[in-house]
Amino acid sequence: MKNTLFLFLLIACLQAPAQKPKTFRPFIQPCDCRFRVDSSYIAAVPPALKADSVYNPPFDSSFQRQCGYLVVPENRKKASSRLIRLPFIIVKSKNPGKKKDPVLSTSGGPGNSSLRWASGITRSSLIQDRDCIAFEQRGTRFAIPYLRSTELDMAWREAYRHNLSKDSMTIVGVKRYRQTLERKGIDLAGYNSDETVSDIHDLLTALQIDSVNLMGGSYSGGLMMAVLQKNPAKIRSLVLDSPLPMFTPIDEDEPVNFNEALDVLAARCATDSAGQALYGDLNGRFRRYFTAIANTVFYFPYVEKGSTDTLQVQYTKNELLDAVVSNMLNAATLKDVPFIINEIIRGNHAPYIRRYLDRIFNVYPAPDGMRISVYCADQSAYHSEAVIRQLYALYPYMMGYRINDVYKAMCDCWKAPPVSPVTKQAFYSAAPALIADGAMDPACRPLYMAEISHYLPNAQCFLFKNRSHGVGGKEMFDMVQQFIDHPYRTLVAPAPDIIPYRVP
């Protein structure tokens, strides 16, 4: 009898409908616009951050702010996932007749902090008619947790201090880095663009925003497109500055992107009489020189800060290439690149190698954990090493040099699962977009504007002939204002060196 009763109860339990797990509802935790800095994941990263320190963004006190943390699961695929906090700042327009579709911005990188945008926007015309929202992505500096540790920085220092292989020490540092974060309870599978896209939509829902204008640059340009892809109903318009579309395999493109940008820069020098005399055949001489030194090891006498011992530090073409690429990416130093190339070819390496080593030993330049996680999930998981080898055959002087500071060997150690294949696919949308890029952008070429506009037929694209990555500036913001006010109206370029970019 007891066995019969037990069997009856067992069958009843099996036949009963399974109870659905409760759906988590993201919520807002208000705060006073002084964001607590999560230093429990930081080991001596300057500036020193104490456990009880706060971040109080500089701000025009004449504007009203609403601040808070969006509270969401760290990993939405796990029912037992812990909660994380993502700060945001809403700068309130003082216009009583303001529009109901705010502007939301988040920074690129991936891994850069986004909150400082809120202080700058008070000087923009955008705030006249709309509230503006700065949203900090998960894992970045003022999010809780912040994915930062210094094991990779320390491994790089060790490599240069003892002339060890930087590639080998990078793998050592990445393993230590991952282990440190995991010991803190970080679930690295929760840090990727799919989760950030969900975060942004959860923020819109929690703030009861039905229509929004999205702004993003570089990586966050592609991120904003993914936000559109997930739920286009709430997206009124997009502004994309030097965007990296999700469907682009950047590591397979970037060596070509750099060389194309260098060709444009060299052509500018060739058409200028003074520049031609100083910098004639700039790209040809650059390639010949770097090909000639491709396997050369140089030595530089370097005294580490706080020491009296002189290190004979090894360096190769890679550190010299870094000087060229980093200055091309920087709008303020783009004009100096021809001079830098000439100096390197002349053998004057010292100022550039010293600057490079100063960063290694004093600045902690290794990527944040969020940058590693996103690049591994979004990019490396979908890259072809065979294609990258083809690039090295085309550009042998770039063999072994990686423009991106996150690459497949690191990702094999980091073990971040890939984003959804759907996120990596191109998609069509009628949403209006303003897209801009610099002609000498060595990272995200204007080609990407053409590719995006193929899928977004209501996009308007503009080429800034004298700019690099991240055009910014007054002309761009004037165009942004006009576009957001009337996103389907044809824009007129405000200056001769800004031209519409259309595919024939």
Image: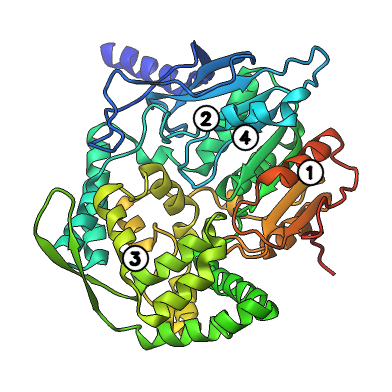
Q: Residues within 10 Å of mark 3 (few under 14, many from 20)?
A: few
Whether residue 163 appears in this view of the structure is no
Q: Residue 369: x percent and y percent?
A: 36, 43
Report how far apart the C-alphas of labels 1 and 3 lie in the structure: 39 Å
Measure the C-alpha gap from mark 3 to mark 4: 37 Å
- Which is nearer the N-term, disc 4 or disc 2? 4
> Dot 4 lies on which element?
strand
Q: Nearer the viewer, mark 1 or mark 3?
A: 3
Q: Report the colour scheme.
A: rainbow
Tag 3: residue type?
Pro
Q: In the image, which disc is placed on residue 105?
A: 4
Give the numbered dot on residue 115: 2
Q: Which mark is residue 339?
A: none
Between the C-alphas of marks 1 and 2, the distance is 23 Å
Q: Amino acid at mark 4?
A: Ser
* Horizontal relation, residue 476 to residue 152: left or right: right
* Sequence-wise first label, 1 or 3: 3
Report, in whole angstroms, how far the alpha carbon at label 1 lies from the one at label 4.
16 Å
- Depicted 86 relative to depicted 359: above or below: above
The image position of residue 264, as x and y in percent, is 64, 73
Q: On the rendered structure, is 17 left or right of 207? A: left
Where is mark 3, residue-wise? 351
- Write down the quadrant of residue 489 in the picture: top right
Residue drawn 14% across the image and 48% down it? 306
Residue 387 in the image, given as x and y percentages of width and height: 49, 75
Mark 1 or 2, closer to the camera: 1
